[in-house]
Image (cartoon, coloured by chain):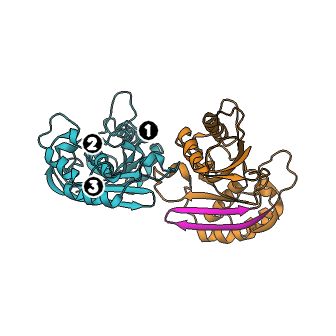
Chain colours: A cyan, B orange
């Protein structure tokens, strides 16, 4: 049996997230059904690098699945896309060793959080960014973000989630950039806690609008207390960009 | 009474076009209702540079309307946007002389038609381009487009429409460009016939995929017969970019 790795993108707006749920439209079920229709295999199980929440987008989500299909990888990409709706696309397929696991073998993941702080949001980009009613100081946000780089207990930036062993994660890259009225926060880490990027975004937005001094971010981190951090920023600004193995 | 000019953008996907129709969601009714809520004026009539069809987008549609509102133009932009749904945005408001008519005074309009010819369309851009199953030769399309520049009878490129006096129009600018897997056709003219840009796009696509020689476009133009030209390309690739007064 082949172990196939897929790289896919999806517009999360009309999905109830990655993971299959009863009576909800999810990316996992949509993808599994497309593969099943194509291969005729009944029990297709797509194993993703991680679940994304309702409304969260992906540019480079990675999954693996087992199949006896004889199709070449190039044909597989085209054929799966022919069975997918317009808000999901597979960009690449690759044969992997039997042991490859898209979830457990992920070494790092890169997320991007996009904010618009202009007076008039574009109707074409509104689904893909979080709207800030206040103009933000992106360079202040970048400086405030410095204290989150490296290995820390990020308990202040996680929504409670059962069965977590540890909230210690290593942020390998964290940058805040602006282009025009758009600000994006890139966070790469060896793993992410539940709602971690959105809590970081909500916190940095509070700094960027002048509501908090930049030193506050270090205090929040040290407190290891979620109530100290900013709100969980809206899902529609979040993109899973890349998974590194 | 003030005569106000608005410049607006909309994502046409979920609209049945510009013009108000019974039981359908249209941009005109959506905008008029937003203004009416804001000003308390019952009979608001938004007069556009031209109607756009169902699914067609606008980056720079222009309308004018009469109102007794006391709000400054800057406040008006923000206030109207606060009453608009996420797929329409007003970018600018301006006081105009009483006689200004957004429809009759338009001197030129620029439309852009966007085509994607890559193997895998982006889930984020699929709503905003027409997908070609064949790779297209954009430079051949650009050469073929040359014969459409200038003043001609464009009857071969119009869908029948009652009460048309003449099909003669002047195309002041026509260009075909490519960036990556995206091709865009810009057409600026002193006026447009019904479905004219989409018929031009459908014709140039036939040339770009090698189905027709480039000389065919001149023959189609001379024939003054709609059945000679290519199909009307899909609405979702079309954008009204700019109206010049």
Q: Position of residue A26 (x, y in %)?
A: 37, 36
Write the residue at 63% across / 70% down.
B140
Q: Which residue is mark 3?
A: A187
- Which quarter shows the C terminus of chain B? bottom right
| Mark whose residue sits in front, 3 or 1 | 3
Q: CA distance from mark 1 to mark 2?
A: 19 Å
Q: Which residue is mark 1?
A: A14
Q: Position of residue A41 (x, y in %)?
A: 34, 38
| B172 within the magenta span | yes
Residue B155 at least partly seen: yes
Please give the chain letter of the residue carrying mark 3: A
| Disc number placed over residue A203 in the picture, else none | none
Label 2: element kind:
loop
In screen coordinates, is B134 left or right of A207?
A: right
Q: Nearer the viewer, residue B69 or B94?
A: B69
Write the residue at 68% across / 34% down.
B41
* Chain-order first, disc 3 or disc 1: 1
| A107 within the magenta span | no
Q: Which residue is mark 2?
A: A195
A119 above or below B31?
below
Please give the chain letter of the residue carrying mark 2: A
* Identity of the residue furthest to the top in this view: A23
| Mark whose residue sits in front, 1 or 2 | 2
């Amino acid at each position: 049996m082949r172990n196939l790795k897929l790289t896919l993108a999806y517009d999360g707006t009309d999905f109830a997230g990655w993971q299959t749920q009863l009576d909800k439209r999810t990316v996992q079920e949509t993808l599994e059904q497309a593969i099943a229709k194509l291969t005729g295999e009944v029990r297709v199980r797509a194993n993703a690098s991680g679940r994304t929440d309702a409304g969260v987008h992906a540019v480079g989500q990675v999954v693996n699945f087992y199949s006896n299909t004889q199709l070449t990888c190039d044909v597989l990409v085209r054929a799966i896309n022919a069975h997918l709706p317009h808000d999901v696309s597979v960009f690449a397929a690759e044969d992997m060793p039997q042991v490859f696991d898209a979830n457990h073998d992920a070494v790092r993941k890169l997320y991007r959080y996009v904010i618009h702080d202009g007076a008039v949001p574009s109707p074409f980009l509104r689904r893909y960014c979080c709207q800030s009613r206040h103009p933000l100081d992106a360079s202040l946000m970048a400086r405030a973000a410095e204290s989150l780089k490296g290995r820390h207990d990020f308990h202040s930036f996680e929504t409670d989630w059962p069965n977590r062993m540890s909230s210690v994660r290593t942020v390998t890259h964290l940058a805040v950039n602006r282009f025009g009225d758009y600000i994006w926060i890139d966070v790469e880490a060896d793993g992410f806690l539940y709602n971690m990027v959105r809590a970081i975004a909500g916190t940095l937005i509070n700094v960027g609008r002048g509501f908090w001094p930049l030193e506050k971010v270090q205090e929040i981190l040290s407190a290891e207390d979620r109530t100290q951090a900013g709100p969980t920023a809206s899902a529609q600004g979040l993109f899973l960009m890349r998974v590194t193995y």
